[in-house]
Image (cartoon, rainbow, N blue to C red):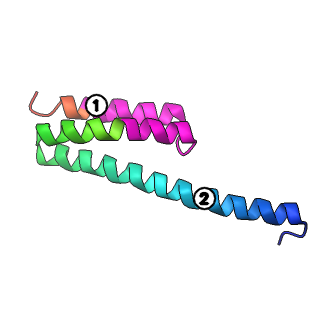
Amino acid sequence: MANTSSAKKATRKIARRTEINKNRRSRVRTFIRKVEEAIAAGNKADAEAAFLVVQPELMRAATKGVLHKNTASRKVSRLSKRVRAIQA
């Protein structure tokens, strides 16, 4: 348990950031799931539309520190490859 006032404040800040990051991570996962569902259904138009939404969302998460930059880039790359492969 935190004893000093600065440690208590740090605990409050960490709790706030954790909540925000959890929301951002959940949001990214939701968008990724929409792309994957469209890919599974074989619907190229929906997959491309969902991909256009998820790409900036992933990069924003990387900018905010929720994901590492390379992780976000890797996810974008792999999703892009899967979207292009639909009815190729």
Q: Which residue is mark 2?
A: 18
Residue drawn at (75%, 63%) of the image: 11
The local secondary structure at tag 1 comes to: helix
Other-residue count near label 2 (Cα within 10 Å), few / some / many at <14 / 14–19 / ≥20: few
Extreme bottom residue here? 1
- Between marks 2 and 1, how big is the CA–CA gap? 29 Å
Three-letter residue code for mark 2: Thr
Tell me which segment is drawn in magenta. 56-81
Q: Earlier in the sequence, mark 2 or mark 1?
A: 2
The local secondary structure at tag 2 comes to: helix
Examine the residues drawn in magenta and state their main secondary structure. Answer: helix
Residue drawn at (48%, 58%) of the image: 23
Task: Please say if 34 is above or below 56.
Answer: below
Three-letter residue code for mark 1: Ser
Circles 2 and 1 in contact, beta carbons < 8 Å: no
| Labelled disc at residue 32 | none
Using residue 6 as the reference point, say whether residue 10 is left or right of it: left
Position in image of residue 71 (x %, y %): 48, 36
Residue 28 is a magenta residue? no
Residue 87, located in which quarter of the rendered image?
top left
| Labelled disc at residue 80 | 1
Position in image of residue 13 (x %, y %): 70, 59
Task: Please say if 15 is above or below 81.
Answer: below
Extreme right residue here? 4
Position in image of residue 74 (x %, y %): 42, 32
